[in-house]
Image (spheres, rainbow, N blue to C red):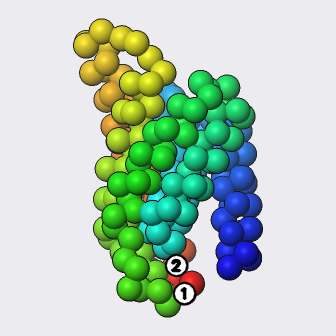
């Protein structure tokens, strides 16, 4: 149990470092995947709603500190998203967690909600600017994140991951 917690913490910390350094370099017109969000969704689907919320809070704070964001903005948006994602957790599949084609769809919807919440928290804009920002910084990065999450299907054997 403690081994799993330590692995999750190290994974999230490593992905946070990658998110604020390397991913910034490969961003296309500020459109970039959110690797931390993908990992948080994976952890939440595998371990449940409450652990997902706890991990998302701390990952969001670290993202805000390292990424020069408004402290609490990433935490808030990711906690809300993991609260909803937690309802997709299947507590009866304790021995194995299966990633299938629903995973990128969950990531897509979660990334859209995450980015929209983040935009509402950090910016105060009029309606026309808000629509442009939602498309450019909400929906397009969400699609990029969902496509990136497809890699989890490739790197797992038929999508089955033993826990």
Residue 117 image position (x, y, % from top left):
39, 33
Residue 40 image position (x, y, % from top left):
53, 57
152 or 4, which is in the foreground? 4
Local crowd size for mark 1, using a 10 Å CA cut-off: few (<14), some (14–19), many (≥20) = few
Q: Is residue 85 above or below residue 152?
A: above
Residue bearing the label numbered 2:
156
Real-space Cα distance between discs 1 and 2?
Answer: 10 Å
Dot label at residue 99:
none
Mark toward the viewer: 1 or 2: 1
Q: Residue at x 72, y 45 (%)?
A: 17
What is the quadrant of the N terminus in the image?
bottom right
Residue 133 image position (x, y, % from top left):
36, 22
Local crowd size for mark 2, using a 10 Å CA cut-off: few (<14), some (14–19), many (≥20) = few
Residue bearing the label numbered 1:
162
Q: Residue at x 52, y 83 (%)?
A: 161
Residue at disc 2, secondary structure: loop
Question: Is residue 155 shown to the viewer in this render?
Answer: yes
Q: Is residue 116 above or below residue 35?
A: above
The part of the image, by quadrant, that contains residue 163 is bottom right
2 or 134, which is in the foreground? 2
Q: How many marks?
A: 2
Badge 1 vs badge 2, beta-carbon distance below 8 Å: no
Residue 118 image position (x, y, % from top left):
45, 31
């Amino acid at each position: 149990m403690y081994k799993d917690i330590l692995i999750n913490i190290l994974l999230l910390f490593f992905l946070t470092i990658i998110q604020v350094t390397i991913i910034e370099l490969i961003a296309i017109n500020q459109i970039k995947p959110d690797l931390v969000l993908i990992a948080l969704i994976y952890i939440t689907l595998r371990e449940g709603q409450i652990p997902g919320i706890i991990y998302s809070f701390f990952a969001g704070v670290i993202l805000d500190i390292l990424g020069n964001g408004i402290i609490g903005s990433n935490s808030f948006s990711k906690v809300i998203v993991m609260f909803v994602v937690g309802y997709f957790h299947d507590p009866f599949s304790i021995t194995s967690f299966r990633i299938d084609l629903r995973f990128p769809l969950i990531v897509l919807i979660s990334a859209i909600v995450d980015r929209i919440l983040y935009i509402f928290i950090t910016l105060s804009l009029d309606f026309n600017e808000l629509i442009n920002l939602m498309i450019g910084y909400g929906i397009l990065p969400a699609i990029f994140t969902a496509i990136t999450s497809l890699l989890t299907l490739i790197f797992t054997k038929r999508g089955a991951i033993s826990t």
